[in-house]
Image (tube, rainbow, N blue to C red):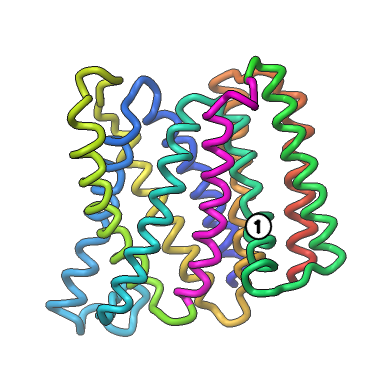
């Protein structure tokens, strides 16, 4: 069951990437992130309100939000900081890079999760995982070569390194998710860390974007921003729930979840008409094969 949930989350996450790209076109990055988070809070607020004031209505269901102690709230703040760090890097990169290049690179995130599990938790790679990591890293390198063909100087192009940093911090977030899921209810994690994101992002917007907003790209509201929230909240809910199920493995769930890269890849190819699609298809197949070996090695 948790494998099916991971697949559903993958499709939702792929659609989320598309709406991110649409929202960022000729738009200011920081307020787009803030507004999308505010929409997420709007979607989650009713569950928090009912759980606190009319608990009998939701108690025992998947949507009940249990109260947690101060220590848990501090852990959720850390989760919010990690996710926002990854998002800031990813959103800026996605705004300036072709979707068919940025999304597949971000899809290599499970490899870094596996490597992180090996370094932090002392896990050892089996044969399948070793092959999966190797193939994915080769594909990662091939995407960098393809980027050069599109005029991206990877040594000096900060947006390429932004997507790399977004991928690494995203992997860290995945490792932290499994730690949180072993201790706290999935809805508590999702609801509280989303609200902390709103607070932190509000501060960032107020002090970093607002003072210079007249000198930079203006913010334009698009309904695609609301769909960012809708698809992300739904994808995360399914993802967190999958991690709470007996036998679920973060390496497998993360791997399947990233297979949703196919959605933004084809959007970039057929709608945005990105360049060098044939080369990128070969690179993408490499990433998918690498993910498959990771999956086989984690069963």
In the rendering, at what x and y percent does residue 4 appear? 60, 64
Q: Label 1: how many residues lie within 10 Å, few (<14), some (14-19) or many (20+)?
A: many
Quadrant containing the N terminus in the rendered view:
bottom right
Q: Position of residue 184 (x, y in %)?
A: 40, 79
Q: Residue at x 19, y 31 (%)?
A: 210
Between residue 129 and residue 211, name the one nearer to us.
211
Which residue is under mark 1? 255
Q: Secondary structure at mark 1?
A: helix
278 in relation to 238, above or below? above
Task: Please state the horizontal and vertical placement of residue 206, each as a whole percent of the image.
Answer: 18, 39
Q: Is residue 16 left or right of residue 171?
A: left
Residue 146 lies, with reference to residue 82, above or below; the image says above
User: What residue is at 58 percent from the left and 38 percent from the top?
Assistant: 103
Residue extending furthest toward the top: 151
State yes or no: residue 169 in magenta. Answer: yes
User: Main SS of the magenta segment?
Assistant: helix
- Report the residue at 16% width, 69% height from top: 49
Instruction: Decide if residue 229 is on the left or right side of residue 257.
Output: left
Image quarter hosting the C terminus: bottom right
Using the image, determine if residue 156 lies above or below residue 53: above
Which residue occupies the extreme front position in the image? 156
Q: For the magenta stretch, what is the residue range?
A: 153-181
Residue at left 62%, top 46%?
Answer: 107
- Tell me where residue 249 sits by quadrant: bottom right
Q: Nearer the viewer, residue 90 or 258?
A: 90
Residue 188 screen position, x and y as percent: 33, 72
């Amino acid at each position: 069951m948790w494998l099916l949930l991971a697949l559903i989350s993958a499709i939702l996450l792929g659609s989320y990437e598309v709406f991110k790209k649409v929202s960022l076109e000729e738009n200011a990055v920081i307020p787009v992130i803030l507004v999308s988070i505010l929409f997420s809070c709007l979607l989650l607020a009713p569950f928090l309100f009912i759980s606190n004031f009319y608990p009998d209505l939701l108690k025992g269901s998947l949507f009940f939000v249990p109260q947690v102690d101060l220590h848990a709230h501090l852990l959720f703040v850390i989760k919010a900081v990690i996710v926002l760090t990854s998002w800031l890097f990813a959103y800026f990169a996605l705004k300036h890079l072709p979707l068919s290049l940025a999304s597949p690179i971000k899809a290599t995130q499970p490899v870094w999760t596996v490597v992180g599990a090996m370094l932090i938790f002392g896990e050892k790679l089996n044969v399948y995982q070793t092959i999966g990591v190797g193939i994915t890293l080769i594909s990662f390198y091939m995407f960098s070569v393809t980027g050069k063909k599109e005029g991206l100087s990877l040594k000096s192009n900060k947006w390429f390194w932004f997507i790399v940093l977004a991928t690494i911090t995203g992997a860290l977030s995945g490792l932290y998710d499994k730690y949180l899921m072993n201790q706290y209810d999935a809805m508590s994690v999702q609801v509280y860390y989303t609200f902390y994101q709103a607070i932190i992002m509000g501060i960032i917007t107020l002090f970093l974007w607002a003072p210079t907003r007249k000198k930079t790209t203006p913010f334009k509201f698009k309904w695609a921003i609301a769909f960012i929230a809708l698809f992300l909240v739904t994808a995360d809910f399914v993802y967190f729930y999958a991690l709470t199920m007996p036998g679920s493995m973060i390496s497998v769930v993360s791997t399947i979840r990233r297979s949703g890269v196919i959605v933004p890849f084809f959007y970039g190819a057929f709608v945005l008409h990105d360049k060098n699609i044939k080369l990128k298809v070969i690179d993408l197949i490499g990433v998918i094969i690498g993910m498959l070996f990771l999956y086989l090695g984690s069963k």
